[in-house]
Image: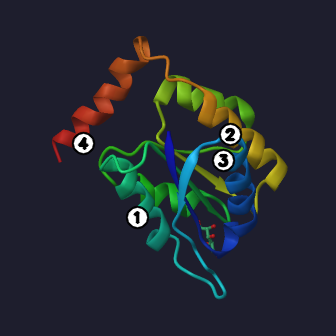
Amino acid sequence: MKVAIASDHGGINIREEIKSLLKELGIEFVDLGCECSTSVDYPDYALPVAEMVANGEVDRGILVCGTGIGMSIAANKVKGIRCALVHDMFSAKATREHNDSNILAMGERVIGPGLAREIAKIWLTTEYEGGRHANRVGKISSYEETK
Ligand code: RB5
């Protein structure tokens, strides 16, 4: 698996924590920033990560901002992206099993790096269940094809 990760200025600490997790898990990753000495605009980071996932350059993406909301809204504008905004471990597992989410968004003003690490670990290691969920995810893809 290969992962693209990025944050705005509001998510730098969790981004660093997740990079250390990815190294620990032996997962290859590309870090798209930000360098963030000043405040930046989250779409400038969410959209390149989402494009990389959508075009198959990487398998999954992880995005962090202050709330995770802006990152998730922006990423979900890209065709083929199922970005889940997650702040608890139950949802981390469920969104992989049920939604086959391909991007994880988190907010550093909402949760700390310890919980973010646990959420990301579950999200990275949980498989999509398919089955009855495939029809539901397929309806989202079919809708995208009409646009
Ligand atoms: C930046 O101040 C903040 O708006 C951003 O990190 C994020 O929370 C947006 O959704």
The residue closer to the viewer here, 102 or 43, is 102
Secondary element at image label 1: helix
Specify the label residue 144 is tagged with.
4
Q: Residue 138: where, in percent of width, then height?
A: 30, 26
Residue under pointer 2: 25
- The CA span between labels 3 and 4 is 31 Å
Taking the image as shown, residue 53 lies to the left or right of residue 60, namely left
Number of other residues with Cα within 10 Å of mark 1, as a class: few under 14, some 14 to 19, many 20 or more: some
Ligand 1 within 8 Å, label 4 CB? no
The answer, for residue 77, to whether it is visible in the render is: no
Secondary element at image label 3: helix
Residue 46, relative to residue 78: is it above or below?
A: below
Question: In the image, which is nearer the foreground, mark 1 or mark 4?
Answer: 1
Q: Residue at x 37, y 19 (%)?
A: 134
Specify the label residue 22 is tagged with.
3
Secondary element at image label 4: helix
Question: In the image, which is nearer the foreground, mark 3 or mark 4?
Answer: 3
- The CA span between labels 2 and 4 is 33 Å
Number of other residues with Cα within 10 Å of mark 4, as a class: few under 14, some 14 to 19, many 20 or more: few
Q: In the rendered structure, which amino acid carries the disc numbered 3?
A: Leu
In primary-sequence order, the first of circles 1 and 4 is 1
Quadrant of the rendered image holding ligand 1: bottom right
Q: Residue 32: where, in percent of width, then height?
A: 51, 67
Residue under pointer 1: 48
